[in-house]
């Protein structure tokens, strides 16, 4: 970015001051986003609202449904659960005057189901504010990120600042199940010199995302009549042994796996059982047990290596058991598989946002890895240097009574706005 004495400083300072004055506008926009019940598969209404807002900002709008036939040709395609008819992506494009670097912002509009309404302190689609927190499904994951990236560009344009580089805002569908929404944008050739995935990052600058994949294990017992129960080998008992082995492997991996951006790798390496099923009738001794779970991996691990480690560990532990030795569990990885990704923490986009953070908030930014998969990986694999940065906390993702700190949304908006100026450059 070219600097022009005090004039440049004044432009930046005025922008930050206007964002502070516009707190209510920013939070009201977020509340409107929360009030759309955009559970995966039901994204159309919120996308029409966002498209209208972007159009009022003067952006060029591309509203399109992902093309499954084209998606299937990509190695990154993930099998869909719900078709894309009536589920459009929205992309807003600001064309810079030229001579600056382009910047892409990416976020998803779909949210997971809030579950039983009576479990919530407030209406999950109400956007209630209490004690500095805004409550609602998507507050942290990730409508606050959408609000920050949208409002940052809006305040820049409202100030009459003419950017040199292009800015692209992507609002994608189906992130909770796949990364096909972001992939569809890539296939339409939406690219930039760098990108920001505005998932919840606790306001940390995150140049890495861990991976996440699902496993399924079939454990067999021996069937028997309820009148000959002593002949029965319970798959539940055998399954519990596998459950214990999974816990053991998690502890081993936490001790052994290292990455500089994950000083405490426990969250990124999360390895646990989410489903434990056996039996269909109270008076019928079960024959099988199904165990399903999730395995996390660090960015310096390969998916196939981690899967091999898991499968071999379960096999070895099974050999120690007199029943499982001759009736080994059947282990496979199926369903979701989000590989990790990372960029050099010294990349210019990281340094630019560190500077923007320090200048807008008056404190040093924390640079760490993101605990969990995100669409950042698709962008990085496609050669777009990307970081995760946004308001919200991962501890609230998919949680009952999900919330975001209102002040974090404002601070994220300031950092993003200043980051845009620094990266794209602007006329003075």
Image (cartoon, rainbow, N blue to C red):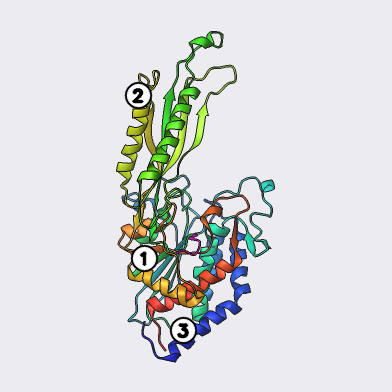
Residues at marks 1 and 3, CA–CA distance in whole angstroms: 23 Å
Q: Is residue 159 visible?
A: no
Q: Quadrant of the C terminus?
A: bottom left
N-terminal-most mark, 2 or 3: 3
Query: Which of these two is toward me, 118 or 399?
Result: 399
| Tag in front: 1 or 2 | 2
Q: Are marks 1 and 3 in contact (CB under 8 Å)?
A: no
The residue sitting at 43% across, 46% down in the picture is 80
Q: Which residues are magenta?
A: 200-204
Extreme front residue here? 255
Q: Say above or below: 289 vs 229.
A: below
Q: Is residue 267 visible?
A: yes
- Residue that badge 3 annotates: 161
Extreme top residue here? 227
- Residue that badge 1 annotates: 190
Residues at marks 1 and 2, CA–CA distance in whole angstroms: 51 Å
N-terminal-most mark, 1 or 3: 3
Query: Which of these two is toward me, 141 or 8?
Result: 8
- Residue that badge 2 annotates: 319
Question: What is the magenta segment's predominant secondary structure?
Answer: loop
Q: Quadrant of the N terminus?
A: bottom left
State the SS at label 3: loop
């Amino acid at each position: 970015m070219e600097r022009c004495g005090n004039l440049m400083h004044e432009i930046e300072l005025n922008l930050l001051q206007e964002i502070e004055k516009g707190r209510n506008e920013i939070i009201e926009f977020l509340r409107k986003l929360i009030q759309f019940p955009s559970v995966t598969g039901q994204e159309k209404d919120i996308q029409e609202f966002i498209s209208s807002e972007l159009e009022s900002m003067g952006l060029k709008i591309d509203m399109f449904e992902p093309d499954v036939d084209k998606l299937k040709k990509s190695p990154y395609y993930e099998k869909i659960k719900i078709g894309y008819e009536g589920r459009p992506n929205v992309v807003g494009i600001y064309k810079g005057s030229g001579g600056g670097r382009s910047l892409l912002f990416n976020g998803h509009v779909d949210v997971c189901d809030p579950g039983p309404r009576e479990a919530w302190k407030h209406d999950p689609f109400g956007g209630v504010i209490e004690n500095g927190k805004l409550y609602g499904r998507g507050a942290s994951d990730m409508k606050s990120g959408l609000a920050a990236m949208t409002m940052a560009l809006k305040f820049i344009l409202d100030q009459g600042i003419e950017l040199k580089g292009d800015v692209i805002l992507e609002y994608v569908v189906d992130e909770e199940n796949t990364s096909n929404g972001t992939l569809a944008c890539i296939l339409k050739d939406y690219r930039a010199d760098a990108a920001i995935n505005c998932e919840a990052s606790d306001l940390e600058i995150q140049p890495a995302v861990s991976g996440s994949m699902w496993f399924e294990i079939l454990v067999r017992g021996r069937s028997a009549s309820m009148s000959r129960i002593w002949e029965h080998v319970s798959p539940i008992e055998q399954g519990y042994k596998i459950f214990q082995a999974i816990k053991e492997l998690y502890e081993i991996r936490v001790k052994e796996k290292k990455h500089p951006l994950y000083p405490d790798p426990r969250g990124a390496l999360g390895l646990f059982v989410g489903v434990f099923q056996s039996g269909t009738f109270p008076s019928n001794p079960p024959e099988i047990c199904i165990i399903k779970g999730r395995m996390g991996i660090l960015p310096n691990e390969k998916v196939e290596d981690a899967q091999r480690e898991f499968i071999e560990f379960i096999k070895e532990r099974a050999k120690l058991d007199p029943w499982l030795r001759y009736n080994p569990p059947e282990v496979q990885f199926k369903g979701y598989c989000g590989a990790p990704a990372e960029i050099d923490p010294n990349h210019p986009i990281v340094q630019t946002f560190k500077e923007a953070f320090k200048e807008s908030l008056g404190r040093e930014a924390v640079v760490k890895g993101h605990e969990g998969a995100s669409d950042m990986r698709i962008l990085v694999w496609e050669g777009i240097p990307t970081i995760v940065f946004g308001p919200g906390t991962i501890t609230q993702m998919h949680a009952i009574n999900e919330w975001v700190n209102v002040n974090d949304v404002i601070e994220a908006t300031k950092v993003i706005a200043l980051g845009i100026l620094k990266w794209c450059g602007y006329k003075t």
